[in-house]
Image (cartoon, rainbow, N blue to C red):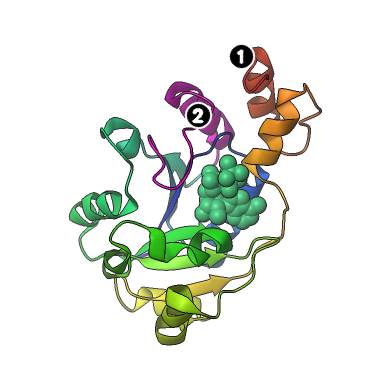
Amino acid sequence: MSPIGIFGGTFDPVHYGHLRPALEMQQDLNLSEVRFIPCRIPPHKTKPKASVEHRLAMLQLALEGLEGMCVDQRELQREGISYMVDTLTSLRQELGERPICLILGMDAFAGIHRWHRWRDLLRLAHLVVASRPGSEVPLRGVPGDLLQHFSTRQPRRLLEKPSGVVLLHPVTQLDISATQTRKLAAKSGDLRFLMPEKVRNYIEQHRLYLS
Ligand code: ATP
């Protein structure tokens, strides 16, 4: 049973710093698919600037025609704060014993102890951590302990069980963030090459993020 990748985020908006690491994860780890799961209400951030409808539309445009990549709308359809543990619980019910790889950037992993019921995350899925410019590998605290006890650099270990492994995986380093793209959009700056053209056009057409 090939593993499935789950990539959660606010995607406000989606950019190449999401897309390229997801593609590399899919290819390097032989993930049969990567499901992008936009959150409705992020637990650790202020309210997204763009509406649910706009964030979803941009993500759908970005993934159009990409084989093995799709949007999963379960967090958008669920009321209340979008806790990943609830998302993984429902995925686990659907997927049985199939390995689930929760893809996250190094910055997100470094704050994993602040996630709701973080201990259950590893019971439900593997954590597959993408390197990210400006974020060091955490050596101390809960993330450091998780690395000490559960980490590997060998992707084949993801196939051995459905959950419970932490894999640090180097990806092409793209120093792009949604915050940066929103700031640029706010002053009608040039968004080319930070995201797919269709997403850039959508932002401009709908006058998103303008201050
Ligand atoms: P913001 O700037 O609004 O905080 P963001 O660019 O970090 O947003 P999110 O949608 O919050 O984007 O991130 C979703 C996931 O993608 C997180 O796990 C994050 O670590 C990861 N991620 C985002 N940008 C990058 C990047 N440039 N390289 C690697 N991982 C990234």
Q: Is residue 196 visible?
A: no
Residue at 52% x, 66% y: name it.
110
Please tell me whether residue 60 is drawn above or below residue 208 in the rendered image: below
Tell me which amino acid carries mark 2.
Answer: Arg
Quarter residue 188 falls in: top right
Which residue position is annotated with label 2? 55
Q: Is residue 172 left or right of residue 34?
A: right
Please tell me whether residue 18 is drawn above or below residue 194 in the rendered image: below
Is residue 51 a member of the stretch shown in magenta?
yes
Q: Quadrant of the C terminus?
A: top right
Residue at 27% x, 35% y: name it.
80
Tell me which amino acid carries mark 1.
Answer: His
Is residue 139 a member of the stretch shown in magenta?
no
Quarter residue 162 falls in: bottom left
- Crowding at mark 2 (Cα within 10 Å: few <14, some 14-19, many 20+): many
Which element is circle 1 on? Answer: loop
Residue at 31% x, 40% y: name it.
81
Residue at 34% x, 33% y: name it.
76
Reading the chain from its start, which is encountered first: label 2 or label 1?
Answer: 2
Which element is circle 2 on? Answer: helix
- Crowding at mark 1 (Cα within 10 Å: few <14, some 14-19, many 20+): few
Q: Is residue 136 visible?
A: yes
Query: What percent of the width, then of the height, locates residue 95?
Result: 24, 56
Range covered by the magenta-colored residues: 39-66
Marking on residue 134: none
Which residue position is annotated with label 1? 206
Seen from the viewer's position, the closer of residues 143 and 68 is 143
Seen from the viewer's position, the closer of residues 21 and 79 is 79
Query: What percent of the width, then of the height, locates residue 67?
Result: 51, 44
Q: Quadrant of the N terminus?
A: bottom left
Seen from the viewer's position, the closer of residues 77 and 184 is 184
